[in-house]
Structure formats: C-alpha cells, structure tokens
Image (cartoon, rainbow, N blue to C red):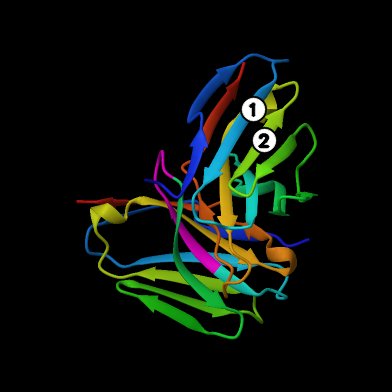
Amino acid sequence: DADVTQTPRNRITKTGKRIMLECSQTKGHDRMYWYRQDPGLGLRLIYYSFDVKDINKGEISDGYSVSRQAQAKFSLSLESAIPNQTALYFCATSAPDRSPDTQYFGPGTRLTVL
Amino acid sequence: KQEVTQIPAALSVPEGENLVLNCSFTDSAIYNLQWFRQDPGKGLTSLLLIQSSQREQTSGRLNASLDKSSGRSTLYIAASQPGDSATYLCAVQAAGNKLTFGGGTRVLVKP
C-alpha cells in the first residue's frame, strides 16, 4: 500500500462548486504539505502544517483553505472553484526528526474546473 | 525570493547517450538541493539529495553536483535507457523546510 494517498485521483467540476481534496498518510509524519503543479512552473506550495494544531500559508494560498483533521489526514478545499485552479495537486509529508528532512509525495490529484 | 530554473525544458536523446540536466537558483542560502523524478500519474520520487556542504552525490548511474556559490546543480545520467524517460525536477530547501521547485526537464530516451 502507498504511504501517501490522495483522493480523488481525478476530478472535473464546474466554476463555483466547492471541492475537497483529501490526503492520508501512514508514514507517521508530523509535517504535511499541499502543492499545485502547472505546466512548466514546477510545484508551488499552497499550505503546510507542522502538526495538528499548526497551519501555515504557502506561496499561493488565496482561494484555498485546509483542515488538519488528524496527524494522518490533511484536506485541501476550494470554496468556490475557478478555471485557473485547474492543475495537478500534490500532497507531501516529512518527518522533522530526520536529517535531511525529505518530503514524500502522493500520486497527485488532477483537477479540472470548467 | 528564491527562483529555480531548469534548462532545457525538454530533451530527447538516443538510448545509451549520457544525459545532462541543469538547474540554477538565485539565493545561495539553502540547506540542500534535491533532484526528483516524476512519472505520469505518479507522484514525485526523490533521486538524490545534496546537502549544502556537499559537492556531489552519486547513486548508480546518477550523479548530481552542486556549486552553491554560483547557484548551479547538474544531474548526470550515464548510459541512458528508455526507462529513464520522465520529467526531472530540482528543488532547493531553505529555512522552514520549504521546497522551491524548478519547472522541470522532460526527458525522452529513444530506443
């Protein structure tokens, strides 16, 4: 079984709809991250969480919100989806007690907003 | 603000040829630099991580160098194989464990 899972893997929705992307991990890591990838732009950080009570904005948090329901779960929400949020979304985890603090990525969720 | 650039954006080589992928970054205050491989429909897989105090790392046919002062890293893949076809991303890690990614180089190795 994969250590970092994302659901759904693919989603097509319409402008204005509320969407939630979910991430679960079995690695026992405290730190979790959400990124989006656009063609040719690499991955950009949306939000990150260093533990259940810690939530931080990343580089491009506008239009997104997150919830850290438990150590193993970190959800990303688009309250009112818009077409320029069409992208590939990745969740990642890391463990701060390891040096170096390598991030482990899920398989991604491809989101299309029409 | 850290910016990471990868050139070329795409590369096509015949099987057996050596691959050279370039990554440059604007702020030398980094903890480490990582090279990732991305396959369609799959997440990112870490290939090599070079600490800021290191000059290079090697794993099998892969060798990555780091010149922090000039803001450059190069990933070499020796004797390329069709299975090496993928997108390769470099990322630098700075304070707060944040990764800044380059746009990637899409590699095609032709049999």
Please identify the residue farthest to the left as the structure is shown: B111
Residue at 60% in and 16% down: A13
Classify residue B46 as left or right of residue A65.
left
Residue A64 lies, in percent from the top left, at: 75, 34
Q: Is residue A51 magenta?
A: no
Residue B41 lies, in percent from the top left, at: 41, 38
Q: Amino acid at mark 1?
A: Met
| Few, some or many residues within 10 Å of mark 1 (<14, 14–19, 20+) | some
Looking at the rendered structure, the secondary structure element under dot 2 is: strand
**Labels 2 and 1 in the same subunit:** yes
Residue at 73% in and 62% down: B2
Q: Amino acid at mark 2?
A: Leu
Q: Is residue A39 visible?
A: no
Residue at 78% in and 61% down: B1
Circle number at residue A102: none
Quarter of the rendering containing residue A22 = top right
Circle number at residue A20: 1
Looking at the rendered structure, the secondary structure element under dot 1 is: strand
Q: Which residue is mark 2?
A: A76
Name the image quarter holding the N terminus of chain A.
top left
Q: Nearer the viewer, residue B87 or A2?
A: A2
Quarter of the rendering containing residue A16 = top right
Residue A3 lies, in percent from the top left, at: 45, 50
Of the image marks 2 and 1, the number of the one nearer the N terminus? 1
- Decide: is A85 above or below B58: above
Read off the magenta span. Answer: B34-42
Count of numbered tags: 2
Q: Is residue B41 magenta?
A: yes
In contact (CB < 8 Å): disc 2 and disc 1: yes
Residue B108 lies, in percent from the top left, at: 33, 50
